[in-house]
């Protein structure tokens, strides 16, 4: 009965003020929801997608190094394909070294990333795989290519490099 005793202007002002307060509460709740969504997306990108993209790039570079080793085999002077190359063998070996430097950076960044325990374990497995791949597979092939031992390089590639790549499932299932 008291609200009815107020003038129409006061009653409308009170109703408007209540509606405005409710609108402000809904707006604040919406802004908080947007902020939470932003924080969730930021976490997703920083802690999940960015490390995954780096790991994917690292694996691609490992495969690229294998490709460069294969291309290096085509520089065997006894092969009819050697004359088709207008660049030195060193261009392939240099590319492997360039990729190695990028792999080192990516691996360091992955090891420093703030990620979940399962992701951390996967990164450690990738680091171990990379070390074994280089030591058992890529390094002997590079050494043989650099020494001009193309037959030995091809044998190392087939017997050590490819199996090292396959042991980590990085050969595309071949």
Image: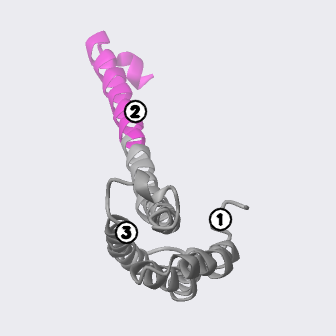
- Reading the chain from its start, which is encountered first: label 2 or label 1? 2
* Residue at numbered disc 3: 99
Instruction: Give the CA separation, mark 2 to mark 3.
Output: 59 Å
Q: Residue at x 69, y 77 (%)?
A: 167
Mark 2 vs mark 3: in front: 3
Q: In terms of depth relative to the viewer, which is nearer, 137 or 123?
A: 137
Q: Which one is earlier in the sequence, the residue at label 1 or at label 3?
A: 3
Is 166 positioned to the left or the right of 51 in the image? Answer: right
Instruction: Estimate how packed mark 3 is, as few (under 14), some (14 to 19) or many (20 or more) residues with alpha carbons within 10 Å.
Output: some
| Label 1 sits on residue | 171
Query: On screen, 15 above or below 81?
Result: above
For label 1, the SS is loop
Q: Colour scheme used in the picture?
A: one colour
Residue 121 in view here? no
**Residue ID at (66%, 75%):** 158
Q: Tell me the quadrant of the picture where the C terminus can be found.
A: bottom right
Q: Is residue 14 magenta?
A: yes
- Residue nearer the viewer, 160 or 166: 160
Query: Looking at the image, can residue 98 be seen?
Result: yes
Residue 6 versus residue 85: which sits nearer the camera?
85
Mark 2 vs 3, N-terminal side: 2
Q: Which residue is mark 2?
A: 22
Q: Is residue 100 above or below residue 45?
A: below
Neighbour tally class for label 1: few under 14, some 14-19, many 20 plus, Cα within 10 Å: some
For numbered disc 2, what is the local secondary structure? helix
Across and down, in percent, residue 93 comes to 37, 72
Position in image of residue 60 (x %, y %): 50, 61
Residue farthest toward the right in the current orientation of the protein = 174
Q: Mark 2 packing: few (<14 Cα in 10 Å), some, or many (20+)?
A: few
**Which stretch is magenta?**
1-30
Instruction: For marks 1 and 3, give the CA distance.
Output: 17 Å
């Amino acid at each position: 009965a008291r609200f009815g005793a107020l003038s129409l202007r006061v009653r409308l002002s009170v109703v408007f003020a209540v509606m405005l307060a409710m609108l402000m509460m809904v707006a604040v709740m919406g802004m908080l929801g947007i902020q939470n969504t932003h924080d969730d997306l930021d976490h997703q990108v920083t802690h999940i997608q960015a490390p995954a993209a780096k790991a994917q790039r690292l694996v691609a570079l490992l495969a690229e190094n294998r490709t460069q080793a294969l291309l290096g085999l085509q520089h065997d002077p006894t092969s009819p394909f050697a004359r088709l190359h207008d660049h030195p063998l060193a261009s392939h070996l240099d590319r492997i070294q360039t990729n190695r430097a990028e792999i080192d950076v990516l691996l360091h960044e992955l090891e420093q990333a703030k990620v979940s325990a399962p992701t951390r374990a996967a990164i450690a497995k990738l680091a171990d795989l990379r070390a074994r791949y280089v030591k058992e597979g890529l390094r002997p092939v590079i050494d043989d290519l650099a020494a001009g031992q193309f037959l030995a390089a091809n044998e190392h590639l087939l017997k050590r490099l490819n199996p090292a790549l396959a042991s980590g499932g990085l050969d595309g299932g071949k």
